[in-house]
Every structure is written in structure tokens, then in C-alpha cells.
């Protein structure tokens, strides 16, 4: 295996959720297990919601957990810059290339028109997807509308073939490209979409493995198609199960603390206890091993083939038990 390169790519639009903290932990453990590198990438293209204070809080939360990254906005590295807002020119250059090669096209549909399309398809019992009407516009009409200053997004011409994802947790998952619409890669405000920017950055940063929550599984065929269109080989993917509450529903405020900041505020909670518990939410150590482990022991044994395909359940009492074990081991 070539050098393992993984990334944790939070959006600085709020506090770090406990599920995202576990994703960061799994990436750190995988990188350390294989002698690889962890990249911290800040996905801040949402200019309205992204805030420097949120980025600073995320960095502080991760360091409190004991996680250190090898490349990132604060430590540099060969694949920078590590904030997407500092990479906008490269996204736009790539979009221009796709337009020239006929792999993308301008879309002039307004939000109201898109909503009307969605409702029409739902009324006919069809999935609510873009119908591709702007793909058929003549080049002269497109040029004229652009010259007149009409707002336009850019859409990717989605592959119609079968796309197979060899997922390292879920196994082989197959998508029909014909079931996926031509998605936006550059919005009318000239900001890149998530799927386009993430796919480009993963390839340009030479990310070998993308370890993330399985709510991103449906994004994967789109990101793979973008990579292929630009002449790159996509990374390998591992989609880990989401974290639910004890009642089996997605973890939310009604289950108690859901952000890392809220857990940090509990004066009696050690980061070692939280890290230990998070590692075991969806991953099981080899049989016969003591469940109470520090980061170094966890990294020696972590493997994706022992990650469950089923959602993990966050139990505050179980967390308290792990915390007590680490409190007993701590020095006075």
C-alpha cells in the first residue's frame, strides 16, 4: 500500500457534533495504524454561514481530544492551501475545462423554476430531480444570455453508466448514473458545490481513503464521476454508520449533549474517556482485548474491517463508565 493519506474536512458553520468528532477520530486512528498522514481541510465555501470563530472552536475541540494532524491550515503542508475559500480559482478553472470538453453546461433555471419542476415530478410519481432542460440549449443562445448578464449555474453531465463503489465498510454498492441528475458544480454566485469541491480536493491532495459517515454514501458516485471527468482516480471510500440515541433515532438534542463543546463543559469528563468511548461506537476491538484503551493502544488495533454496518447507539451511562475507568488510571 502506498502512503495512506486521509482527511477530516469540517465545515465551520457551527459547533463540532459528536458524530463528526468520531469521524475525525476514525481518520486519525486509521492514519496512525498505517503510518500515514491526516489532513485537516476546512470546507468553508458557504460564505454566509462560515465563521472564523467556528473554525477556531473546531480546532480547539480536536486538540482537546488529543488528535493532531500532519497537514492543515495551521501547520501547512505540500498540498495546501487547506481552506476551500483559498482554492476558488482552481475550482473555476476546472469548471471552464469541463465546459470546453462538453462535460458540463450552463443552467439558467431560477429557484422558482426548479421548485416547479420538483413539484411536477412528484405529482407524476417521479423522483424530484432536475430534468436536464438546459443541456439542450444552443450555444448561441447560451452565449447571448451570458452576455446579457443573466444568472447561471453550471451543471455536470452525469454519467449514465453503472457506478460501483467498493466500500471498505459496506461492501460493493452499485448506483445507476441514469438515476442521478446533472448536479450543480458551480453556483450562480460562482461558489463551487460541495460535491465538486470535495472531489477535486481529495484528488489534488492525494487522499487515498475517505472515511466518513454513511449519510455521504449517495454523494460518492457524483464525486467519483467528477474525478474521472478530470482525469483522476478517486480515493477508496469507507462509510461508517451514524450514531443514534438509545431509542434508535438519530442523535439529537432530545438525547442530551450532542456537541463536543457541551461534553467538554462537563468538568468531570476526561478527553481520554470520551475518545475511548467514541472509538467503540461502531468499531469493535479484537476479541479478548480490554475495552479500556488510550489513543496509542486504539491506533495499534484499529481496522476498518471491524467497523459495523449498523448504526451505533450513544449511551450516556456507558460513556460515564469509561470515564470512571480513565479517572481511576489518572495521576492525582
Image: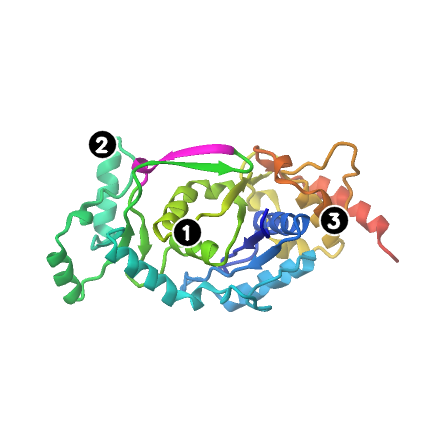
How far apart are labels 1 and 3 at the CA level? 41 Å
Q: Is the residue 74 above or below the residue 286 in the image?
A: below
**Could you tell me if the residues under marks 2 and 1 are in contact, i.e. CB atoms within 8 Å?**
no
Q: Which residue is mark 1?
A: 232
Using residue 292 as the reference point, say whether residue 188 is left or right of it.
Answer: left
> Disc 1 or 3, which lies upstream in sequence?
1
Which of 183/260 is in front? 183
Which of 328/241 is in front? 241
- Residue at horizontal 62%, vertical 36%? 305
How far apart are labels 3 and 2 at the CA level? 52 Å
Q: Which numbered disc covers residue 124?
A: 2
Residue 205 inside the magenta-drawn segment: no
> Disc 3 or 2, which lies upstream in sequence?
2
Image coordinates for residue 113, horizontal then vertical, percent: 21, 49
Among the 4 quarters of the image, the one containing residue 244: top right
Q: Can the viewer see residue 265? A: no
- Residue at horizontal 37%, vertical 48%? 228
Using residue 82 as the reference point, say whether residue 137 is left or right of it.
Answer: left
Q: Is the residue 290 above or below the residue 34 in the image?
A: above
Between label 1 and label 3, give the one nearer the viewer: 1
Q: Which residue is mark 3?
A: 273
Placement of the C terminus among the 4 image quadrants: bottom right
Helix, strand or loop under label 2 = loop
The magenta stretch is 171-180
Among the 4 quarters of the image, the one containing residue 96: bottom left
> Disc 2 or 1, which lies upstream in sequence?
2
Amino acid at each position: 500500500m502506498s502512503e495512506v493519506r486521509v482527511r477530516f474536512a469540517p465545515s465551520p458553520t457551527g459547533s463540532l457534533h459528536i458524530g463528526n468528532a468520531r469521524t475525525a477520530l476514525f481518520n486519525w486512528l486509521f492514519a496512525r495504524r498505517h503510518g500515514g498522514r491526516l489532513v485537516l481541510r476546512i470546507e468553508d465555501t458557504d460564505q454566509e454561514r462560515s465563521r472564523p470563530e467556528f473554525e477556531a472552536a473546531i480546532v480547539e475541540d480536536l486538540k482537546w481530544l488529543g488528535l493532531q494532524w500532519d497537514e492543515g491550515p495551521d501547520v501547512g503542508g505540500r498540498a495546501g492551501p487547506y481552506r476551500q475559500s483559498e482554492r476558488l480559482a482552481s475550482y473555476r478553472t476546472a469548471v471552464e475545462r469541463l465546459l470546453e470538453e462538453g462535460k458540463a453546461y450552463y443552467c439558467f433555471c431560477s429557484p422558482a423554476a426548479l421548485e416547479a419542476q420538483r413539484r411536477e415530478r412528484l405529482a407524476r410519481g417521479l423522483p424530484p430531480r432536475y430534468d436536464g432542460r438546459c443541456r439542450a440549449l444552443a450555444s448561441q443562445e447560451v452565449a447571448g444570455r451570458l452576455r446579457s448578464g443573466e444568472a447561471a449555474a453550471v451543471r455536470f453531465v452525469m454519467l449514465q453508466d453503472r457506478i460501483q463503489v467498493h466500500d471498505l465498510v459496506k461492501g460493493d454498492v452499485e448506483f445507476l448514473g441514469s438515476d442521478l441528475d446533472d448536479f450543480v458544480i458551480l453556483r450562480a454566485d460562482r461558489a463551487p458545490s460541495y460535491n465538486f469541491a470535495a472531489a477535486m480536493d481529495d484528488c489534488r491532495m492525494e487522499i487515498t481513503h475517505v472515511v466518513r459517515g454513511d449519510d455521504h454514501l449517495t454523494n460518492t458516485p457524483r464525486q467519483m464521476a467528477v474525478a474521472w471527468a478530470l482525469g483522476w482516480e478517486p480515493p477508496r471510500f469507507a462509510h461508517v454508520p451514524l450514531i443514534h440515541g438509545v431509542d434508535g433515532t438519530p442523535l439529537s438534542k432530545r438525547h442530551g449533549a450532542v456537541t463536543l463543546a457541551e461534553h467538554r463543559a462537563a468538568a468531570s469528563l476526561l478527553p481520554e474517556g470520551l475518545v475511548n468511548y467514541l472509538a467503540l461506537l461502531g468499531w469493535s476491538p479484537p476479541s479478548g482485548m480490554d475495552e479500556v484503551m488510550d489513543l496509542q493502544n486504539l491506533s495499534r488495533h484499529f481496522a476498518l474491517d471491524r467497523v459495523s454496518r449498523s448504526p451505533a447507539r450513544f449511551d450516556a451511562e456507558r460513556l460515564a463508565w469509561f470515564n470512571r475507568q480513565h479517572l481511576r488510571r489518572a495521576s492525582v
